[in-house]
Image (cartoon, helix red, strand yellow):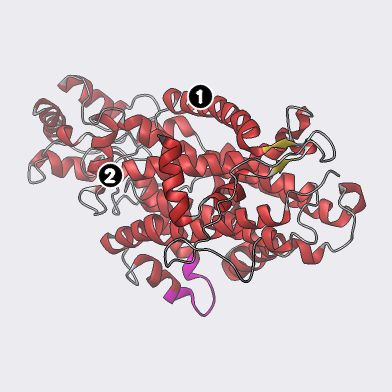
Amino acid sequence: MHKGKGMKFVGDSRISAERKPNIPKDYSEYPGRTEAFWPNFLLKEWLAGSVFLVGFLCLTLAHPSPLEGMADPTDSGYIPLPDWYFLFLYELLKYDFASGPYILFGIIIIPGLAFGGLLLAPFLDKGPGRRPHRRPVAVGMMLLALTSVIWLTYQSASHVDWESRAEANKPVPPSEQVNIDTDSEGYAVFENNCMSCHGEDLQGGAAGPSLVGIDRSVDEVKDIAQNGTGSMPPGQFSGSDEELNKLAEFIISVNKEE
Amino acid sequence: MLQKIYDWIDERVDITPLWRDIADHEVPEHVNPAHHFSAFVYCFGGLTFFVVVIQILSGMFLTMYYVPDIENAWRSVYYLQTEVAHGQIVRGMHHWGASVVVVMLLLHTMRVFFQGAYKKPRELNWMVGVLLFFIILGLGFTGYLLPWDNKAYFATEVGLNIAQDVPIIGDELKTLLSGDEEIVGAQTLARFFAIHVFFLPAALFALLGVHFILIRKQGISGPL
């Protein structure tokens, strides 16, 4: 670089008037088969990226992103679940040594040690060797951590019936949200017999499906209320025949208003 | 014509050295999958960045329709999902991209770890990378609430209760995140939106910048 006396600038700026040639470096003398990043390697990167993008778009087209019903803080029957990459932490907190009086183990000490160790790995594993078999402690700890995370995630996920969960929490389109006459006699019967499973707006919950949008006759509704259907056990309804009539008519009326 | 525009700018701003800085760097043989197929493991970091770019772009388009308040958040997402042309694809990219970014990030971290590439002189870059990992997890956690469906609401409530169990600062931490000591509601959604869209991306960009500058300065780690 030119320094000192005799420097020329563009106007009154600090930009040198001397133009530098815009030519790529020559890598032919570098060891091995070194390649220039621009443009040779970048083009290959783009090709790999396009293949990846196509695969990714196929995934998004094949599986539309899920959306459950609008948040209802009063829905006490809902079983919360975090996204899959937090499942291992969630599962960890179910163990006795990581919950209740030992909750600090679960939320601070164990994750703190694990993630702290990850952050400080270069200072814990200071030996000169880079090959895995030359640093058995570091590699062993990482394998142990990986195995535990995978195991915890598997434990947590395998106990969930994802399909019925998605089915029970389907979103209700705003246009299909029905006005429910909560003052009617039928609703009072519903409240006493059915609401704990089917929800206060008949929208369904963890234990029972939605009663909005069903295609049943009055007699069928009566029969199901008394004798159950599918996973619904019999004997859920306890009341007089008159109440049963009102209940069935109420449920049918909600479905007719649509 | 283009050359003239380039020369005109270069004369005034002297961009050639900058441009050569970006363009001129070697790709050694041992990281090039064209020479050794097993070198595809070196792609994980770049692919992570690629998915992050997808997240940024799809997220920018999502904010065109998303409304961060509890009355309209779910409705706007539902509308985007069902009525807007290609809305489902854009939201799908953002939703699945969040998972893919975590997977790619994990693979990248494992590659660096098992190759021992974090050893001297690359300790700093490893720590920046782990911080980036935390930021990505934070983005995943805050983004989960935004559609305001049951899944979002109750998972966030659990997350906030865990934050509350932290000793000494627990209550303050929860209030800071949710905007209220008790309620998970309008304030929480607004805060998570701000954290997800402004605070964490700002930190993400800054750390990504440091991550890349350090890679260029130190060069990629040599073959094992």
| Left or right of A246, for residue A142 | right
Residue B220: percent from left, percent from top: 73, 48
Between disc 2 and disc 1, whose residue precedes? Answer: 1
Place residue A112 in its image quadrant. Answer: bottom right
Which residue occupies 70% across, 39% down?
Answer: B42
Q: Quadrant of the N terminus of chain B?
A: top left
Task: Give the residues in magenta.
Answer: B163-172
Whether callout 2 and callout 1 share a subunit is answered yes
Which residue occupies 52% across, 38% down?
Answer: A160
Foreground of the two, A54 or B163: A54
Residue A178: percent from left, percent from top: 13, 36
Is residue B154 a member of the stretch shown in magenta? no
Place residue A110 in its image quadrant. Answer: bottom right
Dot in front, 2 or 1: 1
Q: Residue furthest right?
A: A134
User: Chain letter of disc 1?
Assistant: A
